[in-house]
Image (cartoon, rainbow, N blue to C red):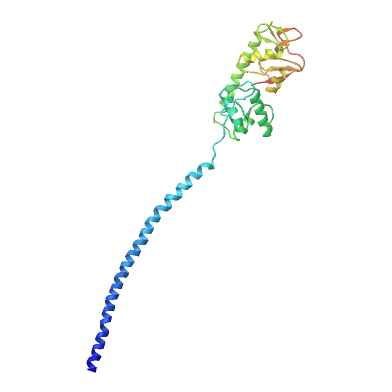
Amino acid sequence: MATSNSHRAPGRAITPLRHSGRALRGTGGAAVLGTVLLGSAFAGGAAQAAPAAPASTPAVASPTAAPANPAPASVLHSSEKLRWGSQGSTVEQLQSALNDEGADLTVDGKFGKLTHGAVKDYQRTNGLQIDGVVGPETRGSLNGGASVGGSGASVPTTGASTSSSSGEAIVDAARTQIGASYSWGSSNPGVSFDCSGLTQYAYKQVGIDLPRTSGQQVAAGSQVSKSEAQPGDLVVWPGHMGIYAGGNKVVDAGRSPGAVTERTIWGNPTFVSFR
């Protein structure tokens, strides 16, 4: 019995090993299954992560690039000089640009007293020559230092031609009033003028609105030398002015002759241009 029992004991010992074998096979199967499931989980994680990176990164970068280059304020698209009496769409652009800089102008395309004052204020604030005239420096400053347009060379040529024909037209308009009497403070075509009344009238005939008094007219223009003066420019003496007719002649409403005449320039006047 002892032998028999001892024979059974190893038999019984083998049985658990078989069970263990089954258990190991079961564990092995579970391990295989676990590996498949775990691999699938990583694969799923990778599949979900891949679209997330490209979807989010470019979408954020694109909108943030736009504010890096802010749109410029109102820009003057002409090289034409603007001053008291100028009119049109370029003056509207100027008024809008000045409003962008803190002015409070009506954008009506008419360069008058308020626009003239706003230009001077801008020039004063930005260290420019304070003359109330929008030339290359003031225009460039308003444009943020940028040059506008590639055909700028052709614009001044056209502008010079226009200024020349306008100047002749101003002289012709003044000449139509020769013979009208002199009367202080008057601007009555065919009847009477004072000196600044005649200059204001002649300029108005070509669409340029000058202020009324001689001092205001001088302040609104730019002084030029006699050699630079062209027909239509103002000839200015202390307390008197007329219109340069070319050839050392002036058309003016003079107190001494008491009428509008064309005569030779005397003394040492200054010349003021609105070109």
Splitting the image into 4 quarters, where does residue 7 fall? bottom left
Location of the C terminus (image quadrant): top right
Is residue 193 rendered to the left or right of residue 89? right
Image x and y of residue 51, in percent: 39, 52
Q: Residue at x 27, y 81 (%)?
A: 16
Name which quarter of the figure residue 150 lies in.
top right
User: From the viewer's perspective, is residue 241 above or below residue 3?
Assistant: above
At 68% from the left edge and 34% from the top edge, which residue is drawn?
125
Please give the name of the residue rendered at 24% of the width and 91% of the height, measured from the top-left corner.
5
Identify the image quadrant of residue 220: top right
Judged left or right of residue 16, residue 156 is right
Residue 222 in view of the camera = no
Does residue 82 sit above or below 197 in this rendering? Answer: below
Q: Could one spot residue 18 in this view of the protein?
A: yes
Q: Position of residue 173 (x, y in %)?
A: 63, 11
Q: Quick one: quadrant of the N terminus?
A: bottom left
Looking at the image, how many numbered discs can be counted on the residues? Answer: 0
Indicate the position of residue 264 as horizontal and vertical percent values: 73, 11
Residue 45 x/y as whole percent: 38, 59
**Relative height, residue 101 to residue 52 (above, below):** above
